[in-house]
Image (tube, helix red, strand yellow):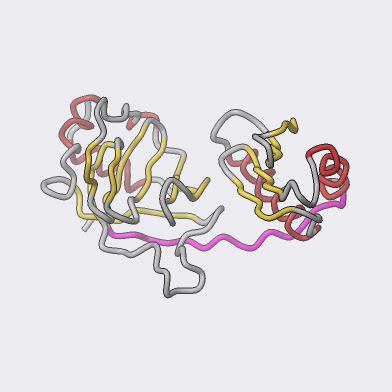
Amino acid sequence: MNIEPYGENGVRIIFGNEINADIHKEVRTSCAMLTSARLEGVVEIVPSFASCLVIFDPRVTSYERLLPAIGEAQGRGDVELPNPATYEIPVMYGGEYGPDLEFVSEYCGLTEEEVIGLHTASVYTVYAVGFMPGFPYLGPLDRKLFTPRLETPRLKVPEGSVGLAQLQTGIYTFESPGGWRIIGKTNWKLFNCESNPYSLLKLGDRVRFVAE
């Protein structure tokens, strides 16, 4: 574990440099410990693939003051993590819903049916939520489906689009620009400002795609 400053009001706790279930469990555990510690001046704790970002109010505390407090919080022992939820999300693959399915199949040397079969065979972990509200970064993707991002991002990617980027897969929760390879679309709404919580998927949840 390494700890380093992140800008003027952040502390980044790094547990590794790869997409890994064991590392990600360390991230979730660390964030849970820090949240329960209620450290003075901390305004937000943001978990990601292999790190945890602690954002603080510089008017209340500082990087130097937070370091020992973070160390103490991390040493308090294990916390009980909530059991992850599992979701089966229906996807319409190919055609107008998946304009990049043909490219992915050709790039990977697979038929379109094999791409769909591999994509629906895995149970993915929500490693991070970001980029846009509720957007889940899911992995690990089967290495046979490794696909580069678009060289030039699209100006509009429809809400619900399911995409691939290298060894990740994800779902666009809103229409937006984007550079992932789109292979399908779901009608599930993953983010709703009127719901509590706003985001359907949370860190550590499991997702399996089902072809419609």
Q: How many marks?
A: 0
Q: Is residue 88 magenta?
A: yes
Give the extent of the magenta segment. Answer: 76-90
Farthest residue in the front direction? 59
Q: Is residue 1 visible?
A: no
Of residue 174 and residue 182, the one placed in the foreground of this image is: 174
Residue at 26% across, 50% down: 161
Q: Is residue 128 above or below residue 142?
A: below
Farthest residue in the left direction? 95
Q: Position of residue 67 (x, y in %)?
A: 83, 39
Q: Quadrant of the N terminus?
A: top right
Residue at 29% across, 48% down: 176
Q: Is residue 149 above or below residue 79?
A: above
Q: Is residue 74 above or below residue 154?
A: below
Of residue 199 and residue 82, the one placed in the foreground of this image is: 199
Residue at 31% across, 30% down: 149
Of residue 3 and residue 65, the one placed in the foreground of this image is: 65
Horizontally, residue 79 falls left or right of residue 97, namely: right
Q: Is residue 181 visible?
A: yes
Instruction: Assign the magenta stretch its main secondary structure.
Output: loop
Q: Position of residue 63 (x, y in %)?
A: 78, 39
Q: Quadrant of the C terminus?
A: bottom left
Residue at 42% across, 62% down: 87
Q: Is residue 63 magenta?
A: no
Q: Position of residue 10 (x, y in %)?
A: 68, 41
Of residue 27 and residue 45, the one placed in the foreground of this image is: 45
Horizontally, residue 128 falls left or right of residue 67, namely: left
